Amino acid sequence: MDLVSTEINQGELKRLLCQRKYHEPSSKSKKMVKILACVFGLIMGFVNGLFGAGGGMLAVPVLTYLYGLNAKRAHATAILVILPLCMVSAVVYLTREGGDWQVYVPTIAGVVVGGVVGAYALKKCGNVVLQFVFYGVMLLAGLKMLF
């Protein structure tokens, strides 16, 4: 027996299989997603507070797999989610450790310009390219830290 129905040709079947369809989750599923989001949020906050960065790197895969966001939306949402976290971490570091404003001022200027350029690049970049570059950078950073 032919596995593919004669009513749907191969191209249509492939299109349907590759298409992500959104189904309204049950209230129980919604509650579980919210609980998982809080748990992963705690983990991201802990990592960001401990290392001073890294929460956003964890946020992108969580937003992609937990909420089903595409790469662009996951990165944009991660930036929005991590911004307040970075501000809180910065206040804690500054109040406890003080800081070197001769380092902060030029670094902040560079980060602001880089952030604007990166946001425009995100808008122009395709989802597949973005995922490839993002996970490639994560892999290379992990390998660099190991060796």
Image (cartoon, grey):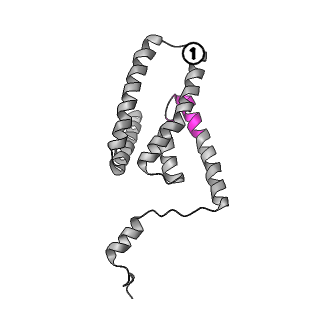
Q: How many marks?
A: 1
Q: Position of residue 108 (x, y in %)?
A: 43, 21
Residue at the location (45% across, 47% down)? 73
Instruction: Identify the amino acid type marked 1.
Output: Glu
Q: Residue at x 48, y 64 (%)?
A: 21
Secondary structure mainly formed by the magenta segment:
helix
Report x, y in % for residue 135: 39, 45
Residue 107 quadrant: top left
Q: Residue pushed farthest bottom?
A: 1
Taking 51 as reference, is 77 above or below it?
Answer: below
Q: Which residue is mark 1?
A: 97
Q: Quadrant of the C terminus?
A: top left
Residue 84 belongs to the span the image colors magenta: no
Q: Considering only vertical position in the picture, is 140 above or below 35?
A: above
Segment colored magenta: 43-55
> In the image, residue 109 lies at what x, y percent?
40, 20
Q: Residue at x 35, y 32 (%)?
A: 117
Going 43% across and 15% down the picture, which residue do you hit? 105
Give coordinates of residue 120: x percent, y percent.
35, 37
Mark 1 residue element: helix
Residue 49 within the segment the image draws in magenta? yes
Q: Quadrant of residue 112?
A: top left
Q: Is residue 48 left or right of residue 39?
A: left
Q: Quadrant of the N terminus?
A: bottom left
Name the side, left or right, on which 91 lies relative to 21: right
